[in-house]
Image: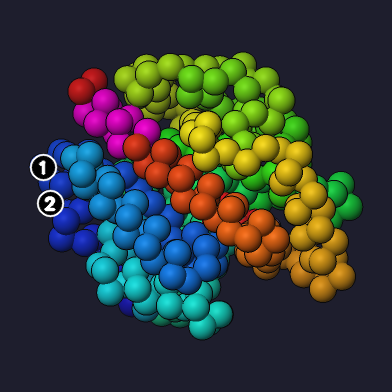
Amino acid sequence: MKDFSSLIEFSEEVRAALADNKPVIALESSIIAQGMPYPTNLETALGMEELARELGVTPATTAVLKGKIKIGLSRAEIEFLAEARKNNDEKVMKLSRKDLSSAIAMGRDGATTVAATMILAHLGGIPVFATGGIGGVHKEAESTFDISADLREFASTPVLVVSAGAKAILDLPKTLEMLETLGVPVIGYRTSVFPAFYSRDSGLPLDLRLDSPSDIAKAFFVQQQSGLNCGMLVANPISPEAEIPGEEMEKCIGEAMAEMKRAGVKGKQVTPFLLSRIAELTESRSLFANIRLVEGNVRLACAIASALKEI
Ligand code: PSU
Ligand code: MN
């Protein structure tokens, strides 16, 4: 086997931007291959990349393809991942931290979750990443022990992630407690409460709040220089006109969770199962909200990535 660095492949666009010291943001691919349904997944992934370019920032969607670490995907590669979702093709793995080494060594294809995207972004020298929502502590974790590896990634990988909080399918108070225990700064962007993905307000207060992309960039710069060596979670609420009230979501989430238990769904299938059942139960309203909030997160991540270049 060749040396490890030969396994990393940058798209030409991303390579050129990094060489010219231009802003770049990372984007995850699990949302394409396991998250959103086809063809919304394809339209959203391409739309987010285009939005970043319009804002003067180069998008780097990450994945593992035929065992190569990809930082920046071609249109054909994004189509390949999106079509895997259409065909429910489990040959495309859902990659978290634990899966990366075997997937690469065995020449597999895989889409990256938040945890794996943070790792690949850091490998590629890209410190800012936009997603929809992060994984967290699941409801009833006291009996299932289901806690997303996304959380521990924030403790050890120095990447800033813009997210609309964490989804109401999770236990949000426990998710925030866990982040605090791990020493991860959770910064509310123009908010003092943790956003709940589809809705702006989970009712949970945040200790840290910053109101401009340049202040967030400054705080992250200090963190990078300080050797604290952890990630930063920027919590960006969904725009008011796109939000779905929490009470409305609760009913669907309860129903989706009951179905999940009946079907015996466990492990890495949990998050994709709940997301797709909720989209069906809300007749795609949740999906529409999801698109809007990812868009807001891409905008903010682009502003932060640009501000970081000014420091
Ligand atoms: N939350 C969403 N949409 C998603 C995910 C989370 O609103 O698509 C995906 C992300 O890729 C996240 C992963 O990293 O689910 C978490 O999965 P798990 O709970 O199995 O760690
Ligand atoms: Mn899990």
Which structural element holds mark 1?
loop
**Label 2 residue near ligand 1, CB within 8 Å:** no
Q: Is residue 89 visible?
A: yes
- Residue 128 location in percent, x, y? 36, 39
**Percent position of residue 234, x then y:** 49, 31
Q: Is residue 217 left or right of residue 311?
A: right
Q: At label 1, which amino acid type do we have?
A: Asp
| Position of residue 175 measured from the top left corner of the image (x, y, whole percent) | 70, 38
Q: Are marks 2 and 1 in contact (CB under 8 Å)?
A: yes
Pick the front one: 199 or 309: 199
**What element does badge 2 sit on?**
helix
Question: As drawn, is 70 to the left or to the right of 16?
Answer: right
Query: Residue at 35% across / 23% down in the picture?
Result: 213
Residue 268 magenta: no
Image: magenta residue range:
300-309
Q: Residues within 10 Å of mark 1 (few under 14, many from 20)?
A: few
Q: Which mark is residue 16?
A: 2
Q: Is residue 206 above or below residue 146?
A: above
- Classed neighbour count for the residue bearing mark 2: other residues with Cα under 10 Å, few (<14), some (14–19), many (≥20): few
Residue at 37% x, 76% y is 80
Which mark identifies residue 20? Answer: 1
